[in-house]
């Protein structure tokens, strides 16, 4: 268990320093005029993969469509951005669109946007990098796709993940941790929905800085608790209240991520509901795994347990501090 915790925290402390959040790639097939379409894509790039991906990636277009000129691609903000114009015939139902491949284990959200029919949303994977256009969009597929996005946003979204882990390290008891995680979900759901519907919103840079600050705040409180187990810090006294307060901030971050991904306007409520349920599922998974590790550590010698928890606390605090400084001055 000690090796597992040290390995996990070592990975979290190094690999994610350059990546703030999970930002899925996006493919959009839009009808701009009768029979005229554009296929746009934005593929998030891993470090060092820009040239490789640009040489290998090609758009997949329906058989009833003809490309008007060659696809245009460029590197922009750690992503490969491309577009091609198309002339198409027929309804296109049953035909494929997307990309030739998605490198690694990346995912993409694909949207088919006709002028006179509901938007269709799909989730692309490395195994299935293209999607089949349906005669009618499926609400179930929208729910599944955005549920997965929400869960992945916690499990692979580094800043939100570290916040949840730090909360568990501080509170420790299973039921209070679950209540705090649920309060976090309720809070971010409020600001997420309000932002998506246009009732509120904050600029991205201050939000990301506040998210990093929330991680540093919890890391400091965990450190205090390790030095003085009897001291009742603010979060130890009111874990659900602190989680709720910071959840409001994290909700603006989720809204920014969804703005990049996009939401199907004809099934907006379903997508938002599924995303939030997915986030809660991801949180509970992280909570459960962290509690299992803590239970294993409790059986180790006190010195080993204390050393592992100190390492975890410093790794989380240093990573959060790095992000905070980067987002304030970057």
Image: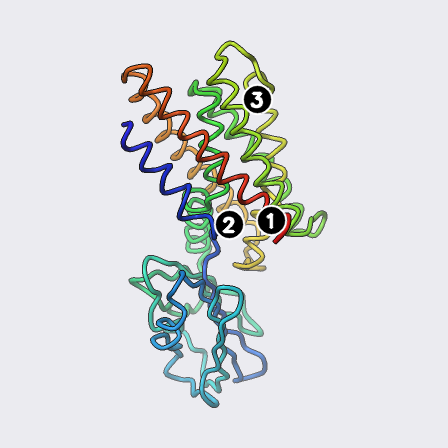
Expressed as whole percent of the image width and height from the top left, the position of residue 58 reads 37, 77
Q: Is residue 254 left or right of residue 54?
A: right
Q: State the residue position of label 3.
A: 235
Counting other residues with Cα less than 10 Å from the Cα at mark 1, is it few (<14), some (14-19), or many (20 or more)? some
Label 2, on which residue? 20
75 left or right of 300?
Answer: right
Residue at disc 1, secondary structure: helix
Considering the image in quadrants, where does the C terminus appear?
bottom right
What residue did someone put label 1 on? 327
Precedes in sequence: disc 3 or disc 1: 3
In the image, what residue occupies the spot 33% across and 69% down?
101
Q: Is residue 112 left or right of residue 286?
A: right
Q: What residue do we see at 46% from left, 58% from top?
A: 24
Say which residue appears at 56% left-offset and 13% top-offset: 232
Q: Tell whether label 2 touches label 3 (CB within 8 Å).
A: no
Report the side of 255 relative to 137 (left or right): right
Give how far across and how far down residue 127 sits, in percent.
Answer: 29, 62
269 or 300: nearer the viewer: 300
The quadrant in which residue 116 appears is bottom right
In depth, the one of 203 and 175 nearer the eye is 203
Q: Quadrant of the N terminus?
A: top left
Gap in angstroms between the C-alphas marked 2 and 1: 10 Å
Q: Return the residue found at the far right.
A: 199
Secondary-structure class at tag 3: helix
- Marks 2 and 1 in Cβ contact (< 8 Å): yes
Question: Would you place residue 285 above or below residue 33 in this image?
Answer: above
In the rendered structure, which disc, 3 or 2, sits on the residue that comes first in sequence? 2
Disc 3 and disc 1 in contact, CB within 8 angstroms: no
């Amino acid at each position: 268990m000690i090796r597992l915790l040290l390995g996990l925290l070592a990975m979290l402390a190094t690999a994610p320093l350059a990546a703030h959040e999970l930002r899925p790639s996006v493919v959009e097939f839009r009808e701009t005029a009768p029979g005229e379409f554009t296929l746009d894509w934005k593929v998030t790039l891993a470090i060092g993969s820009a040239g490789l991906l640009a040489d290998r990636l090609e758009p997949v277009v329906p058989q009833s469509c003809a490309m008007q000129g060659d696809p245009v691609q460029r590197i922009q903000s750690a992503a490969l951005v491309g577009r091609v114009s198309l002339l198409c015939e027929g309804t296109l139902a049953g035909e494929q669109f997307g990309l030739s491949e998605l490198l690694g284990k990346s995912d993409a959200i694909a949207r088919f946007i006709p002028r006179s029919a509901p938007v269709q949303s799909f989730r692309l994977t490395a195994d299935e990098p293209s999607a089949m256009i349906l005669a009618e969009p499926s609400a179930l597929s929208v729910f599944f796709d955005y549920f997965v996005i929400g869960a992945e946003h916690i499990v692979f979204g580094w800043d939100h993940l570290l916040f949840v882990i730090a909360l568990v390290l501080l509170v420790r008891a299973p039921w209070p941790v679950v209540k705090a995680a649920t309060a976090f979900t309720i809070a971010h759901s409020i600001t997420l929905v309000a932002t998506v519907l246009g009732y509120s919103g904050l600029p991205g840079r201050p939000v990301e800085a506040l998210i990093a600050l929330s991680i540093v705040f919890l890391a400091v409180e965990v450190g205090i608790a390790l030095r003085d187990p009897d001291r009742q810090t603010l979060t130890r006294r009111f874990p659900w209240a602190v989680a709720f307060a910071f959840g409001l901030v994290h909700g603006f971050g989720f809204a920014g991520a969804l703005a990049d991904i996009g939401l199907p306007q004809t099934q907006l409520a379903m997508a938002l509901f599924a995303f939030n349920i997915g986030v809660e599922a991801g949180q509970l998974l992280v909570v459960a795994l962290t509690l299992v590790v803590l239970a294993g550590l409790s059986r180790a010698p006190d010195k080993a347990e204390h050393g592992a928890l100190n390492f975890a606390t410093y790794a989380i605090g240093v990573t959060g501090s790095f992000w905070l400084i980067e987002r304030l001055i970057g």
